[in-house]
Structure formats: C-alpha cells, structure tokens
Image (tube, rainbow, N blue to C red):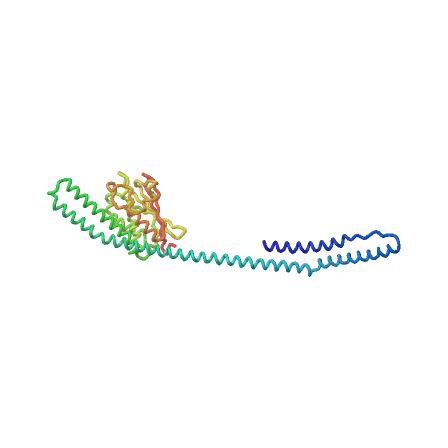
C-alpha cells in the first residue's frame, strides 16, 4: 500500500510538471503580422521569443525522453520498494517473534499441566493400590469369621437371623471381590510388564484349556478362530486378561436355550495396528448403554441375573489405552455383540 502511494505521487508530479511546461510553451500562439516598419520590428522580436520558447519545449521533451530520466524514475521506485519491503519485513518479523514467544509460553504451560496430571494419576493409582491392598485382608477376615460364626450358631438362630447372617457374609464376599478387582485394575499400571511379541492364537488356546474351561463346559459354548490371528506387540499378561474378560462376558451373557458361539478374528490396519474382533450370539446391548459399559463398576443387569462387579470392561479399556489402541462395541438387543480393539502389530508384522 505504501509503495503504491509513493509511486503514484512520484509519477503524478513528473507528469504534471511535464504537462505544465509543455502547455505554457504551446499556448504562445504566433501573432498576426501587422503593417508598418515599427510593427515589423516588434513582430520580429515576438517571433524570435516564440521560437525560443518552442526550442525550450523541444529541449524539455528531449530531456524527458532521455534514458537518464527513465533510469532516475526507476531508481526512485526501486528505492521506495526496498524501503517499504524492509519496513514490512521488520513488522512481520516482530509479529512472528511475538507469536513464537506466545507459543513457547503455551508449550511450557501445557508441559507443566501434563506433568501435574501424570503426578496426580500416579498418586491416585498408588492410593488405589494401597487402599485396596490394605482393605483386602480385613474383608477376608470378616467373610471367613462370619461363615464360622454362622456355622457355629446354625441350630441356635431362627430363620430371620440366619438370613441376616447370609446377607452379611454375602456383602462381605462382594466387597472382597470389588477390592480384588480394584487391586487388579491398579496393577495394570503399577505392575505392568514390558511389551513383547504376543501370539494371540496361543492366548486363546490357553484360555480355553484353563481359565475358561469350566465356563465353556457349563454353557456348552465354543470359541472359533477361523484364520490364524495376527501377533501383537503388547504386555502378554494384560492381553491374556483382556481376551479373558471379553470371551468370559460373551459366555456369561448368552441367550437362554442358545449355546454361546464366539468367533475371534484379526485384521491388520494401515496405521500398523491390529484390529481384533470378538463376536458372539448373546443377548446384545441396548444402544443407549454402549457408551457407559466401559466405566468403572457399571452394571447393566442385577446381581441375581449375572454376577460380577462391573469392572471387567473398564480393565479392558485401560489395557487397550495403555498400549495406544482403541476399544468399542457394536451391538443391538438379541442380536449379539461385536467387541473390537486395536493393539500395535508385532515387529515382523509392521
């Protein structure tokens, strides 16, 4: 904008100056020739003056047409352009410097906030571990001695008193289970193992032979792996826990009169992750509950219908998030469910 104004002023002044000189000279018309000797002399003097003015006009035109004049104008424009350019550059440089300082301050504040957040999470996890560990033994004693007391007073208590004892012992056992699950949840961070190549096929086989063997037998369920699963780079014990919780839930929440059928598949993803799907033919999940089932102690059914503390899927989510993956579910009532999660691919599969 400054360059445009300067150049316009310079060009306008030059043009106006040239035109004024030319017009002043051109406007001097040659007078009519009068009669007489005196008049002839005066006419000759005027004619000489007009010729002189015309010569000046021609000289001015020649001057403006000379290369030196053109170069002078170009030089002035270049100087004006350079001056404006450096002024604009300095202003831009100042703005960039100020913006950089603001970004540095924001970055430092963000790093400090992240540091405090990590420290707070570590303190919270340490507290959860200590609290659950310290509460575990007292609750175990309450449950054990309650059962001993109930057995010793079995023939001395009426029906209502026996029922009250049963409620007390049942509550103690549930609390002990919740403490155990909370302790297990806190150990996902405090006692995590380094990531390593984990064969999901071996994990599925071990679960069917050991941890889930009784549940599979009782429900008549089956776990199929149509194609070999991709290996992942993760904490082996936590992957074991992750699949145990998902397959165990599929066996637990099956439809009455229908044998559970669970299919586990894996698919490589473009971002060097492995997507694992656990598909079942169970009771399904209502759409309004899909977002909250991964929360702590979230239950969709009463304890009379299904046991558990409601922390299993929260454990699954924390395991997946710890490895930089994602987890979700697709389901509808009476249509089964597809739980899927992503984990980093093993090095040779990346």
Q: Position of residue 314 (x, y in %)?
A: 31, 48
Task: Locate residue 223, reporting x and y percent.
Answer: 29, 46
Residue drawn at point x = 32 percent, y = 39 percent: 333
Residue 129 sits above or below residue 249 on the image: below
Q: Position of residue 297 (x, y in %)?
A: 28, 46
The answer to whether residue 210 of the structure is visible from this angle is: no
Q: Name the residue located 53 percent from the left edge and 57 percent from the top edge.
A: 91
Q: Residue furthest bottom?
A: 68
Q: Locate residue 47 relative to residue 202 in the image: left or right.
A: right
| Observer-nearest of 19 and 349 | 19
Instruction: Tell me: 248 left or right of 33.
Output: left
User: Which residue corresponds to the image point at 38% horizontal and 57% vertical from the top-left?
Assistant: 112
Residue 6 appears in the figure: yes
The image quadrant where one finds the C terminus is bottom left
Q: Residue furthest front?
A: 38
Query: Where in the figure is residue 193, as x and y percent of width and height?
Result: 30, 57
Along the viewing direction, whichever of 164 and 194 lies nearer the viewer: 164
């Amino acid at each position: 904008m400054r360059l445009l104004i300067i150049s316009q002023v310079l060009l306008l002044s030059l043009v106006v100056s040239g035109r004024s000189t030319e017009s002043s000279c051109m406007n001097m018309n040659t007078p009519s020739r009068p009669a007489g000797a005196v008049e002839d002399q005066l006419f000759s003097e005027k004619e000489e003056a007009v010729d002189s003015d015309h010569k000046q006009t021609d000289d001015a035109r020649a001057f403006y047409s000379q290369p030196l004049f053109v170069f002078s104008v170009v030089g002035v424009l270049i100087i004006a352009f350079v001056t404006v350019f450096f002024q604009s550059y300095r202003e831009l440089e100042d703005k960039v410097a100020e913006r950089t300082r603001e970004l540095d301050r924001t970055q430092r504040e963000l790093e400090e906030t992240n540091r405090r957040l990590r420290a707070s999470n570590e303190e919270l996890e340490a507290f959860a571990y200590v609290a659950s560990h310290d509460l575990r033994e007292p609750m175990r004693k309450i449950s054990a001695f309650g059962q001993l007391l109930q057995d010793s007073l079995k023939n001395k208590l009426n029906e209502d008193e026996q029922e009250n004892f049963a409620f007390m012992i049942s509550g103690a056992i549930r609390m002990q289970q919740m403490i155990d699950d909370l302790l297990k949840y806190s150990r996902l961070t405090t006692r995590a193992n380094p990531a390593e190549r984990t064969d999901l096929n071996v994990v599925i086989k071990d679960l069917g032979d050991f941890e889930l063997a009784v549940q599979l037998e009782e429900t008549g369920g089956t776990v199929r792996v149509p194609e070999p699963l991709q290996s992942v780079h993760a904490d082996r014990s936590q992957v074991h826990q992750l699949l145990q919780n998902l397959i165990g839930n599929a066996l637990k929440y099956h439809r009455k009169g229908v044998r559970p059928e669970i299919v586990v598949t894996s698919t490589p993803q473009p971002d060097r992750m492995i997507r694992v799907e656990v598909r079942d033919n169970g009771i399904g999940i209502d759409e309004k509950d899909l977002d909250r089932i991964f929360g702590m102690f979230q239950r969709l059914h009463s304890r009379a219908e299904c046991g558990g503390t409601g922390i299993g899927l929260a454990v699954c989510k924390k395991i997946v998030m710890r490895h930089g993956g994602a987890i979700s579910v697709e389901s509808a009532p009476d249509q089964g469910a597809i739980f899927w999660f992503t984990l980093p691919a093993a090095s040779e599969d990346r």
